Amino acid sequence: MAANEPKSTLLQGSLDMLILRTLEPGAQHGYGIARHLHQVSEAFLQVEEGSLYPALHRLERRGWVASQWGTSESNRRAKFYRLTAQGKKQLQAETAAWGKMSQAIERVLSYRPAEA
Amino acid sequence: MSLIGNWFYIWRRDAPGPEAGRGEDEIDDELMFHLRSLVEDHLARGLPADTAWQEAQRRFGSLRRYANACRRGVAASLLARVATAAVLFTLGVVCGWLLLGFSSRHPSVRTAGDLQNRQIDEANAVAKALDFLEEWQRNQSPAALRRAVGAHDLTGRVVDAHGKPIAGARVLVILKTWPGGQYRQDDFFATSDGDGSFSLPRLVPRQGQHAVQVAVFKPGYTLASTYQLKEAGEQPAVDPIRFQLAEASPITLVVNDRRGQPVAGACVAPAGRTSPDGVEHLVYFQASRPVQAAVDREGRVGLECFQRGDEAQIFVRVPGKEWEQHAVHIPSEGNTVEIATRETGDAAAEAAREATTAAPAEPARGAVPEPVSDAAAEPATEAGDETKEEPPAEGDAAAAAIDPRLLGTWRVVEGTTNRHNEPIPRSASRDWQWTFGAGEINTRWLHVSPQPPHRVKKGKSGWTYTVDPTRSPGWLDQRLGEKSPLTLGIYRIEGDTLTICSCFDDKNSVRPTAFESTPDSKNELLVFKRMADADVEPEPKPSAGMPAATEAERLLAAIADEEQDQVIELARQIAKRDGQKAIPFLIGAMDADNAHYLVYGLGFALQELTGVAYSPFHDGAWWRRWWEAHRREYPEELSAAPIPELEKTEHGRHYTPFPKDFETLAGKLAAAGAILKADLGDDATEDHGTGLVLNLAAEAAQAHELRAIPCLIGLIEADNSSDTVYQVGYFGLGKLTGVEYSPFHDGAWWHRWWEKNRGKFAEDVRAMEIPVYEKTPVGREYRPLPANSDTLQGKLALAAEVLDGFRAARAGKGEVARIDLSFYVEELAKHDDPHAIPYLIGMMEAEPRAAGIVRSQGLARMSKLTGVDDPLKKDTDWWRTWWLEAKAKFPADVPTIEIPDYQSPLAFAWTEATAEEKARAAAETKRAAMQAALADVADVPAEERHAEQDANKRYFLIGSPAAAGAPEAGRPLMIALPGGTGGEEFHPFMRRIYKHVLNEGWLMAQPVAPQWDAAQARLNVWPTAGLPDSGAKFTTEEFIAAIVFDVKTKTRIDPRRVFLLGWSSSGPACYATMLEKDSPVAGAFIAMSVFHPEQLPALAGGKGKPFYLLQSPGDRVTPIGFAEDAQAKLSAAGSQVRLDRYAGGHGWHGDIFMTLRTGIEWLDSPRAAPQPRP
């Protein structure tokens, strides 16, 4: 099964980071998070609801986000998630790690052996 | 019906409510909110409600599964709860198997004492479960599928007429795919870079049928698009797309309402253009969002993407209304084109006003203005800034002033308003309190409901005011919130009397000069009396904290005032908080009025409390009878509670309850005419019906009551509205008759259908005549479609009529009426008949503006028939030339058809086959194909039989049942249920299995799946006791038993060697038959099947019996997890189970006969030792 593909693993790890980043400016409900990722990535990232909600609940259990019920922009009851202090630290850590990793990958990809 | 039920359910349960307690419902609520937001998004894109709901649900998948995934996660932190833990552990083990192929662990290994280890295991299991669900979800997504099969980048470049790059062009992409045979459409967009290049990585599938539509939009240049359709098969590469854009003519579009007044706040987007040479460029609505633009307050917007002479298509939406599509001709002179929206002037102006102000329109219906929702305030932020009238400068100077005489609470004693040219509502002259503070006004509404002493208080704040007491008279200006326009007014205070006169004109509030409200003004004149402190009512408490009695009073008051939304919301709150205790009260409240919205709103609240499904027929009287019959099932203090006799409202006094007869379907059918009249007739109170007819049709279908058919046909004939044709045709007649819904099936069509087909029904059904009901207003105006309207010639004639209208409209100037030719063209293409081709070409010649539609909706859909590549790129002349050359290759009379001249009425010089002839021909082709397929197994004896002489229990007996040569113990029998449709077309395959896998001693029986109705034939091919079909006369288990009995009448059968073979759709029936008590079968070979124990008999029924399971780890239709689950659970229940895996996914792969032989030999081997049947 595809569970062992590195692509999937990468995606799964990065979903948490993307959610945390989305929540950095302020609280947002699940649908808002999905919409934000879709729009900001110019529709490249399609977060499936089946991943999003288990991830949100997992982040909440880890104490990285906290949730409370509020009123959505369409005046309906919706569950809003916000970043906790612990979540901010986690986001910083993950962003830093991501930066390092992407730099490393970029270095490998752009490496040209010297002419012999 | 369930679709509609779901829709209502979602709509209601997500309505705004007070903070609810945390609990299991929260996860549901959260997911529901998401689903509903998706639906709203689709609605905003212009999808019809049904489609929006289906699309959102399809994208979202199973709510229940996600909710469970979240819940399991939550529960993981409460691992000390042993019961929960046991469930979780089982889940974990299953998921472990699914993911890692664990097969040796078993839940019973765990002991209750080892808590710590279990916690770790369970946490891991839960994490795995979550990961599995995530992985599974990703695998379902088209994006993931594209990743899995690999996909090409979509690249291209946008340049101008001189070949210079155009940067910043919006590239709008629609990708059409058909995963699993289901159509899917996704939108993407990109922007061209400085080099004019754009790229969408890994977008275009390498294989499988798909289509890519790309449109490019850059102000200043003409709109351009391309369309590429690829049939199934490997696509080695995707060529970069090059767009060369011409310069556009600067055009200003003005959006007016029907009266010619500009519509501020309207939203527009280009939908397409047809150039003077007939080439069409399209923007799909779904992809249009990035290029939508708002008009200014004069309704104007620049649209620089058309050329002079273009026929332009524009999407337009008046705020708060549906999207419309308009056609306009871009004139050769002048820079302005106008379109008139279909909204009536008032509605358009009203909608625009709503969008340009956050100030509420009126404090009518006994309420102070409701708070403007954030959603409504959002457009106000944009449009309101443009349109609001700033206060005069001198007003600002007075902003800080306070008139101490104003402070305190005042009660309205008199008032006149002409905000909406109507006198102040009766309720407004009752206790309306205004409390002036420093710069703020809090208004309170003291509403008195009909039932004394039901005084209801509603509070409202958010209004601010400024005064300038130095003026004479004094100035008093108000606004709601920060963004809304200012309402200018004057005031005076004389003793304890305050008089305020304000101009409520959202766009142009003019300060009144006198204390009066004349009908030609927008002025509101209110006279207040100061209230003594002791008289001031305390602030109302938030609703969640209010005692139950007050909530009930509010509900009754809202019913009296017909505050529909509030009634529904309050009922929901009461039901949620009070639970079953609320039942008698809600019934009494419903019966006091019995308006449709109340039957609906309270009906849903009662549904949640009682489990009785909502029906528009369940009015107050019905619920009273229900309560009398069921009250004893409730706790004593509740069952003793009487239904309150509340004072009836005006509506309630005149309401006639549905008769008791309506409790049965027969009673309703007998009174169908009256039901139609109440729902859609002259007496109907709701414009769009109340769902009574729909409910009746759906109930008849659910009960599979064939005697309802003539009645339902009569209902369609009496109304013939598109809603009724759809609702009764789809939810009722379609399910009863198996006839696929078509918009062409009007009452007259169904009438003819009945006369032709009644003979196929049982005596009591076919004896019935179609009743003649009193026609509804729509029905009286309706002109039935011609008798041949569902034939190709009939549709060609109808399309010609539309074309006539299209040409007539073209003769006029300005806006062209949009006539939907595409619908007819699409219908023509569905016939897949070459006779249609010359007519389609003729249409393009007759009306160049229709050419694009004919190509995309007609000829492109027939490309298999025409064999033309890139049909959209060929112009009309090309098609004419092609036809003259290509027509000879088409059979029969097709080559004799000339391309018609649509200037004169159509005449058909060829004869179209009747539906029966076509069906016969299709059946003949099928038979011939089967005969041809049987050539290699012609030597295998086979006989068609009917078990129990029942025409529906048809089966093939393969092999020779001659008694001679049969072993002493009897012959072995393999009963093979085909997957897929379960139909006879599998017969050649079955004979091959017999020939290559079994030997001559065997007998094989192949049941043919009976088709009880169209839906069952597609969704539940082999119904069982655990997954029944309401229309089926017997279950598959009974069918199999009948076959075994029938074969026994021919020869001796060894009961220990009666086996089942099934795959895919027949798998569940094989499990069910194996597990039932006294099963006639001793073992089963089950391949590529789901496994749902909850739909099966107790698994212990399979004890000692062999199950050979075959499933592919790559199976996406029925994932291998089902087989692994079956293996675990059946083994645990004492069955002998062997699971073999194979590569290749769902379907038979590899050496099929060897695979089958392996399994059957295992089943039939002595070691399996099946229990002999007693």
Image: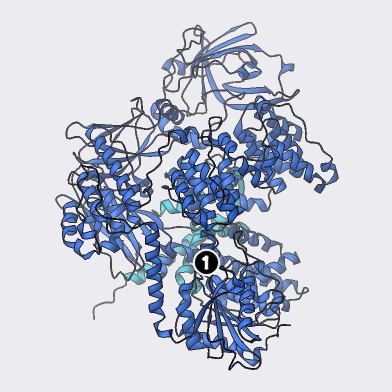
Chain colours: A cyan, B blue
Residue placed most toward the observer, B872 or A112: B872
As displayed, is residue A86 above or below residue B561?
below
Q: Quadrant of the C terminus of chain B?
A: bottom right
Question: Quick check: B17 above or below A43?
Answer: above
Q: Nearer the viewer, residue B919 or B890?
A: B919
Outermost residue to the left: B162
Q: Nearer the viewer, residue B596 or B152?
A: B596
Q: Is residue B83 left or right of residue B903?
A: right
- Chain letter belonging to callout 1: B
- Give x and y (percent) for residue B214: 30, 54
Amino acid type, residue under disc 1 in the picture: Trp
Q: Is residue B96 above or below residue B843?
A: below
Nearest the camera: B987 or B449?
B987
Residue that mark 1 sits on: B136
**How far across and down, in percent of the image, does residue B729 sit?**
49, 48
Q: Is residue B912 left or right of residue A34?
A: left
Residue B394: percent from left, percent from top: 44, 15
Q: Is residue B177 visible?
A: no
Rendered position, B42 above or below B990: above
Residue sitting at x 24%, y 41%: B311
At x 20%, y 34%, the residue is: B331
Residue sitting at x 51%, y 63%: B1018
Residues packed near mark 1 inside 10 Å, few (<14), some (14 to 19) or many (20 plus): some
Residue B826 visible to the viewer: yes
Relative image position of residue B569 (x, y in whole percent) = 64, 37
Which residue occupies 47% across, 49% down?
B51
Q: Quadrant of residue B585?
A: top right
Direction from residue B497 to residue B895 in the image, left or right: left
